[in-house]
Amino acid sequence: MHGLDKSDLKAANERVVLNLVRSEPGISRNEIARRSELSPAAITGIVGRLMDAGLVHEERTESQGKLGRRPTALYLNPQSRLAAGVEITTAGATAALAGLDGHITVQAEIAFDEDPHRFLTAIHQCVLSLTSTAPAPVLGIGVSVPGNMDPETGRVIASTNLHWRDVDAIDLIRPGIKQPVFWENNSNLSALAERWFRPANLAPLDDFVFVTLKVGLGTGLIVNGALARGARAHGGEFGHSVLYPEGYRCQCGNRGCWEEYSSDRALLREYGSSDRTIDSQGIARLALEGDPRARAAIESVAESLGLGLVNVLMALNPAAIALDDFAVTAWPIIEPVLWRVLRDRVPAYWLTGLEVFPSMQTPLKGAIASVLSRYFNGSLGSVLLP
Ligand SMILES: [Zn+2]
C-alpha cells in the first residue's frame, strides 16, 4: 500500500464497490464481498456511504436466502450524478446531459456559425444554462471537436472541416463553469463510446479501431485498453494516409488520401451527385432499395474502405473495427465487399477472430463517456463527491 494513505484507500474501496454495482445491477453485499475481497463489515459501511450519497439503492429480492433472510439487491441511481457532453460539427453543435448509465435526458441544439468565436460563445451559453439548471450535480463536460487539438490546453490547432486554425476554444467555453472540461477529437470519442457502453457480457475492446465516415474519414484508436493519441495528440489520422499518390485532391491539400475515396464526400462523387439534393444516407437507402447507380457507388466506396482497412490492420492488429454513418445503413452491401478485399490482401491468420461491425455510437455519447469513465476510474476524485 505504499503511497496510498487511509483516505485514498477508503476512496478506492468505495470506487470498487460502486463499479461492481454499476457493472452488475442487482448484485448482493455477499457477492460484492466475494468479488472485492473486502470484509462484510467494510462492505456494509461502504454501501451505507454510497446510499447516503444517493448513488445506490437496495431492493428486497424474492428469493429466500440463508437463515430465511431475503438478500437485498443493490442498484445504481443513474440520475444521482450527471455528465455533460457537447458535439461540435459543421452542421451545428449538440449539448446534452446524461445520467451515470449514459442515458441522455436533456438535449439542446446550437446553430452553426462560421465565426468560431461567435459559435463557441453560443455553445458556452448553452452549456452554462444546462449545467446551472441541472437536477443533480454535473461531474464534468466532455467536448467533441472534428479536428486536431491539444487535449491539455483545449486549443484547436486545425480543423479542416470547420475551417478553424489555432482557436483557443477552452477560453471561450470555461468562464463561469465549475466543472472540469475535457476536449477530444470526434473519432476518438466514438471509439471511447463503443468501448465504455459495450455490454458487460462481451469481451472488452482493448485493441480496437473506430472509423468515422461523416464529413471526412477519421479513426479513433484504442491500443492496450487506452486511446492512442501519439506524441502530440494528433495520431489516428489514417484518413490522410495515401491510397493513390496521383489521385483526387483532398481537402487537406494532398492527393489520393484514403478519406477522399471512402468518406461521405467520396460516396457523393461516385454517385455523381453534383447538387445537395441527396446525402450519403439517402444514397445508402437507394442502394438497399435496388437502385443500380447507388449500389455501384456504395460498392466502389466499400472497395476503397477495405483497402484502407488493410493498412490499419497491418499497422495495429486490432481485435475489432467499427464503422459508422452510411456504413450502418448500407452494411448488407458493404460487409461482403470489405471482407473480400481483406481476404484478398491480408494473411488469413491476421483475420482470425477479427470482428468488423457497424456502430450507432456517436461522438456525443463519447463526450459523455469521457466524463463517466474518469468518474468511475477515480480521476475526478472520490465517487461520493460532489
Ligand atoms: Zn487528406
Image (cartoon, grey):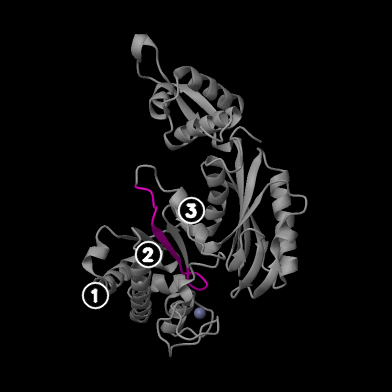
Relative image position of residue 330 (x, y in whole percent):
37, 68
Q: Give the range drawn in magenta.
A: 203-218
Under mark 2, the amino acid is Leu
Q: Nearer the viewer, mark 3 or mark 2?
A: 2
Q: Nearer the viewer, mark 3 or mark 1?
A: 1
Q: Residue 344 carries which label?
A: 1
- SS category of the residue bearing label 2: helix
Under mark 1, the amino acid is Asp
Q: Which mark is residue 316?
A: 2
Name the residue: 53% across, 53% down.
Answer: 365
Q: Which of marks 2 and 1 is in front?
A: 2
Residue 211 magenta-highlighted: yes
For mark 3, what is the residue? 193
Under mark 3, the amino acid is Ala
- SS category of the residue bearing label 1: helix
In-image side of 70 versus 1 (left or right): left
Residue 335 magenta-highlighted: no
Relative image position of residue 3 (x, y in whole percent):
56, 36
Decide which of tag 3 and tag 1 comes sooner along the chain: 3
Classed neighbour count for the residue bearing mark 1: other residues with Cα under 10 Å, few (<14), some (14–19), many (≥20): few
Specify whether tag 3 is near ligand 1 (CB below 8 Å): no
